[in-house]
Image (cartoon, helix red, strand yellow):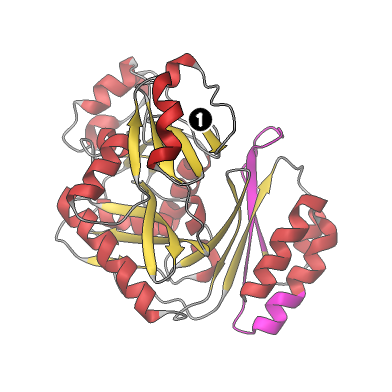
Amino acid sequence: MKPVCVLGNGQLGRMLRQAGEPLGIAVYPVGLDAKPETVPYQESIITAEIERWPETALTKKLAEQETFVNRDIFPCLADRMRQKKLLDDLGLATAPWLLLENAEQCAEIFTTFSQFVIIKRRVGGYDGRGQWRLRQGEQCSLPQDVYGESIVEQGINFSAEVSLIGARSSKGKLVFYPLTDNLHEEGILRISVVRPQLNEKLQQKAETMLSTIMEKLNYIGVMAMECFIDGDNLLINELAPRVHNSGHWTQNGASISQFELHLRAILDLPLPKLVVNSPSVMVNLIGIPINPAWSSLPLVHLHWYEKEVRAGRKLGHLNLTDPDVKRLSGVLTKLAPLLPNEYQRSLSWAIQKL
């Protein structure tokens, strides 16, 4: 079995490494400051946990390798404008958008769009950073370097946010997990809920959309598609050409985790039908220290990233899964006092979703 080098050594690279161990796959998460001679890239399949990276001696070497799976797709999807153009070309629905070219455009934004818009940097920025939400009448005071390097999207009064995670093999085989309901707060994913076989019509629509994208790009591996539900329509918000935060529940709630699935796809291993029989909940642990009491509750699986605690930083997550919705909701209720006040709304939301 060929080893795998992961460009990036954050929590996603760590979990890819963990997923490879039972299969005998050596996975090497590689920091961007690593020296090329310390990395076995020449005999490895290469993947990435991040869409965009600086040019270093190492990334130059990796970019030269034909074994860098999806190498030429990352620049396309890392740029929000190029990503939007791709979706437009494929006839897939997104929020209406345009390139923000200069400050004078700010005065015209609300004649083009509704009373609420979101400005996003074309590259970089995540978890709410590099984004500005503006309502009609608010002053449009933005950093000068935003102009020409950002897009404006019409704000959508969506009824729900969902994501679909799927994978494609080099032979074109496609497999998908059930749609995941997500709740974001201040631009950061707080909690995800999965209820298998809840809405077959919406599931099929999402699978068709993501299939179209992966097949157009000849993409290999796991890809995530975040969407808004607007009436009976799905509007694509963003694509991630990698394993994704909203798929962490698969570690304990699916027959194959998204991390193992990605390794299988890029190594040309079988992609069997994914089995998800029980509802699952994933709780992001953001900016809070570890609490051993979490693990005292039944059903709770703690995944801790061993990172320095900082406000707004994803430090770990909790996965809970059980076929009995009442029991699962009961554990979430017991978990509530063990988490800060800012989690109470999201936990109540998850219990209602179940």
Residue occupied by mark 1: 130
Q: Is residue 190 left or right of residue 215?
A: right
Question: Range of the magenta residues?
Answer: 301-330
Few, some or many C-alpha atoms within 10 Å of disc 1 (few <14, some 14-19, many ≥20)? some
- Residue located 77% across and 68% down the image: 297
Residue 45 visible at all: no
- Residue located 38% across and 80% down the image: 200
- Residue located 27% across and 32% down the image: 75
Q: Is residue 309 magenta?
A: yes
Type of the residue with mark 1: Gly
Q: Nearer the viewer, residue 260 or 103?
A: 103
Give above or below for 163 relative to 116. below
From the top left corner, tell me how far across and down residue 211 is, in percent: 24, 62
Q: Nearer the viewer, residue 70 or 350?
A: 350
Give above or below for 177 relative to 46. below
Residue at the right extreme of this rendering: 337
Q: Nearer the viewer, residue 73 or 6?
A: 73
Residue at the front extreme of this rendering: 111
Give above or below for 185 relative to 102. below
Local SS, label 1: loop
Give above or below for 89 relative to 192. above
Q: Is residue 67 magenta?
A: no
From the top left corner, tell me how far across and down residue 230 is, in percent: 44, 64
